[in-house]
Amino acid sequence: MKKISIVSPIFNDEKSLPECYETVRLLFEGPLKGYEREHIFCDNCSTDSTPELLRNLAKKDSHVKVIFNSRNFGILRSTYNGVMAATGDAVLLFLPVDLQDPPELIPDFVKLWESGYEVVFGIRAQRQESFLMRSLRKIYYRVISRFSYVEYPPDVGDFQLVDRKVINAMKQFEDVNPFMRMMTFECGFKSVGVPYVWRARKHGFSRNRISQLIDQGLLGAISFSNVPMRLALFTGFALALLSFLYAIYVIGVRIFFPEIATRGVPTIIIAIFFFGGMNLLFLGMMGEYIISIFNQVRKRPIVIERERINF
């Protein structure tokens, strides 16, 4: 019997946890009856009753496995650690406990996997969220897709079912800040997409703060694209060229048309602010790469675990 692993990161989701567990269990008693279930919950040091609920579920159901982190390591690192611990023939990289990515698509993913696709990815064609967030996400995904050196379709998240050989390939990466949604495409293999509606949360609110979303966005841009640094290089070259041409123009006007030459104080002030702003922008961009390199060379663990259950 083939095993399907499902990884769900969790943090203070006591209201959503029971529904998530039951939904997955019923799937394996229905359309996925011929497969063994492995549901891995990665708890990011929850402070509500989530740990107790997870222990009770794991006690009554051996197919439920739990990883308790020693602290909150962030959703990306925690989920990746769970994926690396999965033992299934195929692994669903990410099923949110709030079920915003629809679990009813998992049987369709499995059928496509059985037909020969090694990466079956969900495409968030529609989103049930505010117009502002929906627009910002669409812009971000299209920029990443356009400028990444990996062939990455827009609107694709971590809701992906991948074959064991893909997981084995991912284990060869030594990345302390893994960005799984693009890592699978960097591995290659045969893939297919399934569009769906990304649903609104049923309970509570997202713990993924704006600052964390920005961190995740920058991680994807830095890890899988050379464009930011190339943009800095070419912008610097273009500005230097324009400054040189403008200097020639000012000298020419002073020599040949002194009567129309204007005082240069406003021009100098504008130039100082403009070039100062550009310098800070590109220094900050370079700093992001330096931070990424610094974190990588320290070779610190992705996650420090406090406890594992049912492994």
Image: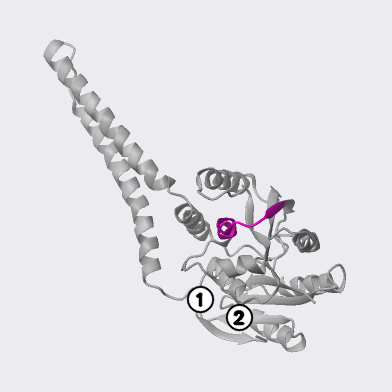
- Occupied quadrant, residue 109: bottom right
**Helix, strand or loop at disc 1?**
loop
Q: Determine if the magenta segment contains residue 60.
A: no
Kindly identify which residue carries mark 2.
67
Q: Residue 212: x and y, percent?
A: 51, 61
Quadrant assignment for the N terminus: bottom right
**Helix, strand or loop at disc 2?**
strand
Mark 2 surroundings within 10 Å by alpha-carbon count, few (fewer than 14), some (14 through 19), many (20 or more): many
Numbered range of the magenta stretch:
181-193
> Mark 1 is on which residue type?
Val
Kindly identify which residue carries mark 1.
303
Label annotation for residue 87:
none
> Mark 2 is on which residue type?
Ile
Counting residues from the start of the chain, the first of labels 2 and 1 encountered is 2
For the residues marked 2 and 1, what is the alpha-carbon distance in whole angstroms?
A: 10 Å
Position above or below: 144 against 306 = above
Q: Determine if the magenta segment contains residue 182.
A: yes
Could one spot residue 230 in this view of the protein? yes
Q: Residue furthest right?
A: 30
Q: Are circles 2 and 1 on residues that touch, CB within 8 Å? A: yes
Quadrant assignment for the C terminus: bottom right
Residue at x 70% of width, y 52% of height? 192
Q: Residue 166: x and y, percent?
A: 62, 65
Residue situated in front as seen by the camera: 104 or 114: 114
51 to the left or right of 249: right
Q: Residue 185: x and y, percent?
A: 59, 56
75 to the left or right of 276: right
Residue at x 72% of width, y 77% of height? 38
